[in-house]
Amino acid sequence: MPRRVRIRIGHSPDPDDAFMFWALAEDRVDTRGLDCEQVLADIQTLNQWARAGRLEVTALSLAAYPFVQKDYALLPHGASIGSGFGPIVVARTSLTLEELGELEVVVPGTLTTSFLALRLVLGDFRHRELPFEEIPDEVASGRAAAGLLIHEGQLTFESYGLTKVLDLGEWWLLETGLPLPLGVNAARRDLGKEVLHDVCEVLGEAIQCALDNRSAALEYALQFGRGIDAAVADRFVSMYVNELTQDYGDEGRQAVTELLRRGEALGAFPAPVEIDFVS
């Protein structure tokens, strides 16, 4: 009797993640007996679920990985890595970094990589958590002085009349010469070596299938664009589904190591980080 293993795959309901998992949704890859079920939730929720080991496979913020490293290992593909661009801080008017450091910033979650990166720039700063999709309006309305934007907010902030104060991906590139790794995919260790290998192969093939069938995958991804048009969705997918998504390579792995090393030095994690990739 064929093996059937239930694999719940958590990811954010945004265009780049949807693009990566289009091939699974459309049965375009051999799942090797894995019964794959997609579970959609915002990244902060996925980070929290991972701390409880809720899903077999999940997207999560790289900054959250040290909190779940005993239960999860990193998959070698599916990461969102930006070279020279990344989450941005916005305000209603231009601000210096010194001025920004004196303000309260609304953030999409304290386990997100964007929050860790901003801590690397500013040190400890006043912040308030808010769902990521509510942050642009919170700043535009004056209820917040500044906001940290992830996902498509990086491209649509000007429609709210906001000004970009800081691009964390640009800062990181100038600081380290490396791309900024933001979101990663991880698999639960208790699946066992054989299943972990199959998960790795299936998800890698799904991403390649989407890249090879870009138009169809992008049309599917548009359903998750929260009102953005096709051009913005296309641009956003191009930013975060690239050659480093298919495989970190040496540069991507170096970037992961550097970011987590700096976070560790900052005291952001509960224990020393052991970086472990599924093979």
Image: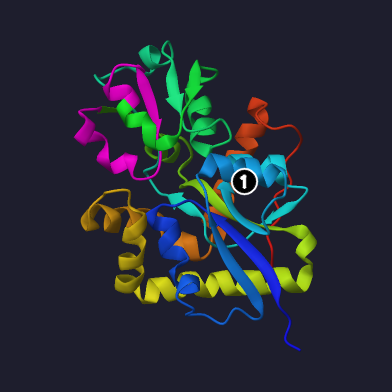
Residue 69 x %, y %: 73, 47
- Seen from this angle, which residue lies furthest bottom? 1
**Pick the front one: 75 or 98:** 75
Position of residue 220 in the picture relative to residue 63 (left or right): left
Q: Give the residue drawn at x 43%, y 69%.
A: 22
Image x and y of residue 118, in percent: 48, 28
| Residue 166 in view here | no
Depicted 119 relative to depicted 23: above or below = above
Q: Quadrant of the N terminus?
A: bottom right
Q: Is residue 102 visible?
A: yes
Image-based side of 45 in relation to 140, left or right: right
Q: Quadrant of residue 145?
A: top left
Residue 145 is a magenta residue: yes
Give the crowd class for mark 1: few <14, some 14-19, many >=20 residues within 10 Å. Answer: some
Residue 23 at x, y percent in the picture:
46, 73
Residue 255 shown left or right of residue 19 in the figure = right
Amino acid type, residue under disc 1 in the picture: Thr
Determine the secondary structure under disc 1. helix
In the picture shown, does residue 6 fall above or below 84?
below
Q: Residue drawn at (33%, 71%), measured in percent from left and top? A: 214
Residue 85: image quadrant is top left
In the picture shown, does residue 86 fall above or below 75? above
Could you tell me how many numbered marks the image carries? 1
Residue range highlighted in magenta? 138-162
Give residue 218's position: percent from left, percent from top.
32, 65
> Is the C terminus in the top left, top right, bottom left or bottom right quadrant?
bottom right
Q: Is residue 203 magenta?
A: no
Q: Foreground: 168 or 270?
A: 270
Residue where numbered disc 1 is placed? 257
Q: Nearer the viewer, residue 59 or 116?
A: 59
Residue occupying image coordinates x 58% and y 46%: 46
Q: Residue at x 69, y 63 (%)?
A: 278
